[in-house]
Amino acid sequence: MAATPTAPALTSEQADATIRSKRYAALLVVVAVIGVIVSLAAWCFLEAIYQIQQELYVHLPHAVGYQHGPPKWWALPVLALGGLMVALAITRLPGDGGHIPAKGLAMGGGAPDPKALSGVVLAGLATVGSGLILGPEAPLIALGSGVAVLTISLARRNFPNEALLIIAAAGSFSAVSFIFESPLLAAVLLIEATGIGGPRLRVIVVPGLLAAGIGSLVSIGLGSFTGLNTSHYALGALPLAAAGHPHLGEFAWTIALAIAIAVATSFVLRGGLRTYRLVSKSRLPRLLPVIALIIGVLAIVFSQITGKSFEEVLFSGQDALPGLVSQASTWSVGALLWLLLIKGIGYSLSLGSFRGGPTFPALFLGAAAGVAASHLPGFPIQAGVAVGMAAGIVAVLRLPLSAVVITTVLTSHAGANVEPLIIVGVVVTYVVTLLLASRSADERPAIGASPPAPPPEASPRSRSSRSALPTEA
């Protein structure tokens, strides 16, 4: 999707004057209304993913006689069909199905063309719904900004490009707030991912926070309105006991685990980029079902080796993460290492082939590495899970603040004693990741390295208007 030039820079005085202006206040009202609309669209998307997974892996096997769950081969035709649907969305619908997950959590380029929403939604539903190893956050970002811009266009309102940029960003804030129980996590993630700084950040962050709050309000309810049920997919604090005061040995293990995750993730990301280079548009309808079948075979191999369910390898890990932590004692070190290896390979293949978000598989694999590391002497599971998740996020997204905040909230039951370990783990992983990237020509640029461009211009009338919001008081 083509991007237009970035908006002009603002001084601190101009930003303050913009926020005080009457038009900015009116824009906040528009953002609040759009936040409700986007929240409904995001809920429908996430609920559709949940229902698709339930039908394919629970209800349909039961209906054909498998009363105790699907057999190990069940995922093969489901994944192949999902791969074919993704290929059709990429090749037959506008928008190429969304951004390439191997290139990170894309936020640049402004809002997508609303015409591309059909391809983005279908590719996201097919990828995440069929059990391929990607999450819903990237399609949600595109869905939120796209629905926001589409709403403005349907209302036949003329907005300057700067206002459209703010509305599109606010739509993403509102949509992503549905996948976490706290809207703060969505806000921090998107603020850092956009790469916007200086006075302009204040102009964009206020509507973004408002939209995230609206999304959370639609979820939890207001007064007699009970809200939309998000318990099936909204990720909250993990079941961890309170952690004791950290010891010197825990910091040593933290550094070692952070380095190991950074190195392993670099191989996963390189594999994703190489997979992407091997997959061309002309071959997608043939290659994507084959790659999906390979992922299914990997899941069966894991189940045969460990005795665990093949579903541990499939899916993003968003729903399985609380169970992994609460049932950590049922996992042997060997089974965890096999999970890391096989799901890591499937994750790498998914990154370069399908359409979805890279965050939740990284979070799950990091937690699995942390559970395995907790078998080391003097390294409790609270520390292992916290450091592993934080390292996994920052190694994939290269967003250190987001990694710290997300992990701190998810491990809040462990208390403040794990926070120094989280920070040390993030810093070490981030530095090692950048060092490894500088030595590899295959690595992508850091996420958030450049600010996003505003969305496409809306109409000749809006093009003739000022490019920024008015600054009068």
Image (cartoon, rainbow, N blue to C red):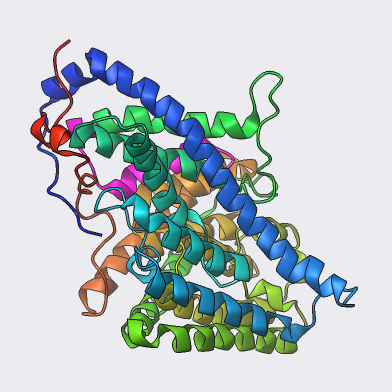
Residue 190 placement: quadrant: top left
Residue 337, percent across and down? Answer: 61, 79
Residue 383's place in the image compared with 244, above or below, is below
For residue 382, side relative to residue 287 (left or right): right
For residue 296, side relative to residue 440 (left or right): right
Residue 8's place in the image compared with 449, above or below, is above
Residue 446, percent across and down? Answer: 26, 62
Residue 364, percent across and down? Answer: 57, 63
Location of the N terminus (image quadrant): bottom left
Residue positioned 26% across, 48% down in the render = 110
Location of the C terminus (image quadrant): top left
Bounds of the magenta segment: 180-201
Residue 187 appearing in the image: no
Q: How many marks?
A: 0
Residue positioned 46% across, 89% down in the render = 286
Q: Dominant secondary structure of the magenta stretch? A: helix
Residue 356 appearing in the image: yes
Within the magenta stretch, is there residue 316? no
Q: As rendered, which of 175 and 441 lies closer to the eye? A: 175
Residue positioned 46% across, 64% down in the render = 356
Residue 405 placement: quadrant: top left
Within the magenta stretch, is there residue 194? yes
